[in-house]
Image: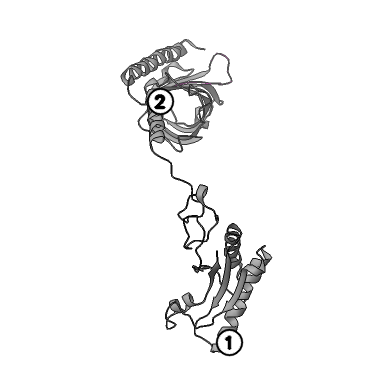
């Protein structure tokens, strides 16, 4: 090392205490406020040098002190020291730098990728003393911050940064860094607020009665529901059982065109209907099939009967006793809506449960 390189080491030794002093001042200013404490990062670095420098890649370290401006942004002061190998004994190239960065984090609660951009100055200490100099620098890069590795908030941080240096030849280097980040103090005021919030939430939960569970949404809580899995829209009594003479439309049950073959989605709906019949084991129903007015009366009557029978057969295959179901076809005789519109005809093509007995 030539004598001039002592200035680089002295510069770094001066900058590091300044960083720590500024961080300590911020810590005191934050006392009693619910904000994240300042944090320090210590990273080892490797520099891929620009060919214009005429030296091998460099190694060194970086120290940053950061202050969060919000949950996702940070302002940080950085200092770094890099040693470049010239290949010639006692003529190494030293670079000491300092500057300010703006950091924008993404997904700050977990693994947090970030972008960084900054400005600063670097003192390049080379073998020819007359060529030494302090020059402007600018850089930008990408990094990744890990989730906390301990209760204190220790994190792992990795970064790749492009740096433009106004030194001779205006080199453009790539800096790669890896190290640890830790807060200067544990934010005690934040912990107090969180404890108070948890206590308030617990108190509210104790005071507000919890709603009773009603799985089939028939208006009767599960603990008093004698007939679980009631189909939506069914009129029930105080025990949660479907009333006698109630009519339940099997909404969503459709057939292939001009056929009694059930569509795949209809089978899913009928599984729910089977569960409802199992939940009210004493209920007997008429399975009523209906059509719109297109086609002859005789044809529609037969089609509606075949469709009602297809529904009953499916339910029987799902474990419902045949004696609990009476399939009946009504054809076009009992429309719910006008047969003059597509919407009306669609409502008229339906299958219903008509409760014969509870």
The answer to whether any part of residue 50 appears in the image is: yes
Is 321 on the left or on the right of 178, as rendered? right
State the extent of the magenta-drawn residues as a range: 78-90
Residue 134, image quadrant: top left
Q: Position of residue 114 (x, y in %)?
A: 46, 36
What residue is disc 2 on? 195
Q: Position of residue 240 (x, y in %)?
A: 50, 56
What residue is disc 1 on? 299
Residues at marks 2 and 1, CA–CA distance in whole angstroms: 73 Å
The answer to whether residue 58 is magenta is no
Query: Which residue is found at the position 35% from the left and 18% from the top?
Result: 27
Query: Which residue is found at the position 51% from the left and 77% from the top?
Result: 349
Residue 140, image quadrant: top left
Q: Position of residue 58 (x, y in %)?
A: 54, 24
For this rendering, which residue is in front, 7 or 12? 12
Tag 2, which secondary structure? helix
For this rendering, which residue is in front, 168 or 306? 306
Tag 1, which secondary structure? helix
Q: Residues within 10 Å of mark 2 (few under 14, many from 20)?
A: few
Count of marks placed on residues:
2
Q: Residues within 10 Å of mark 1 (few under 14, many from 20)?
A: some
Is 307 on the left or on the right of 147, as rendered? right
Foreground disc of the pair 2, 1 = 1
């Amino acid at each position: 090392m030539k004598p001039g390189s002592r200035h680089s080491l002295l510069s770094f030794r001066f900058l590091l205490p300044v960083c720590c002093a500024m961080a300590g001042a911020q810590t005191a200013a934050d006392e009693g406020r619910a904000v994240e404490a300042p944090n320090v990062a210590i990273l080892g670095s490797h520099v891929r040098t620009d060919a214009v420098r005429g030296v091998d890649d460099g190694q060194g370290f970086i120290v940053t002190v950061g202050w969060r401006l919000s949950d996702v942004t940070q302002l940080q002061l950085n200092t770094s020291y890099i040693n470049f190998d010239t290949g010639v004994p006692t003529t190494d190239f030293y670079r000491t730098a300092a500057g300010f960065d703006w950091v924008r984090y993404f997904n700050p609660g977990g693994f947090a990728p970030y972008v960084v951009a900054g400005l600063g100055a670097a003192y390049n200490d080379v073998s020819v003393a007359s060529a030494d100099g302090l020059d402007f620098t600018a850089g930008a890069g990408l990094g990744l911050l890990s989730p906390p590795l301990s209760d204190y908030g220790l994190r792992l941080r990795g970064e790749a940064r492009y740096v433009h240096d106004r030194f001779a030849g205006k080199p453009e280097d790539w800096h790669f860094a890896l190290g640890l980040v830790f807060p200067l103090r544990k934010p005690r005021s934040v912990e107090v607020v969180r404890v108070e919030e948890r206590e308030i939430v617990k108190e509210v939960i104790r005071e507000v009665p919890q709603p009773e569970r009603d799985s089939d949404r028939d208006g009767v809580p599960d603990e008093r529901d004698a007939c679980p899995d009631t189909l939506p829209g069914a009129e029930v009594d105080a025990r949660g059982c479907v009333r006698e003479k109630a009519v339940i439309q099997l909404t969503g049950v459709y057939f292939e065109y001009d056929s009694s073959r059930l569509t795949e989605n209809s089978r899913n709906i009928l599984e729910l209907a089977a569960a409802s019949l199992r939940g009210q084991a004493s209920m007997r129903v008429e399975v009523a099939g209906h059509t719109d007015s297109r086609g002859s009366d005789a044809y529609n009557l037969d089609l509606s009967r075949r469709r009602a029978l297809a529904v009953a057969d499916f339910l029987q295959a799902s474990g419902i006793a045949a004696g609990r179901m009476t399939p009946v076809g009504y054809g076009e005789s009992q429309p719910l809506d006008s047969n003059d519109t597509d919407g009306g005809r669609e409502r008229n093509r339906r299958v219903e449960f008509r409760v014969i007995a509870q």
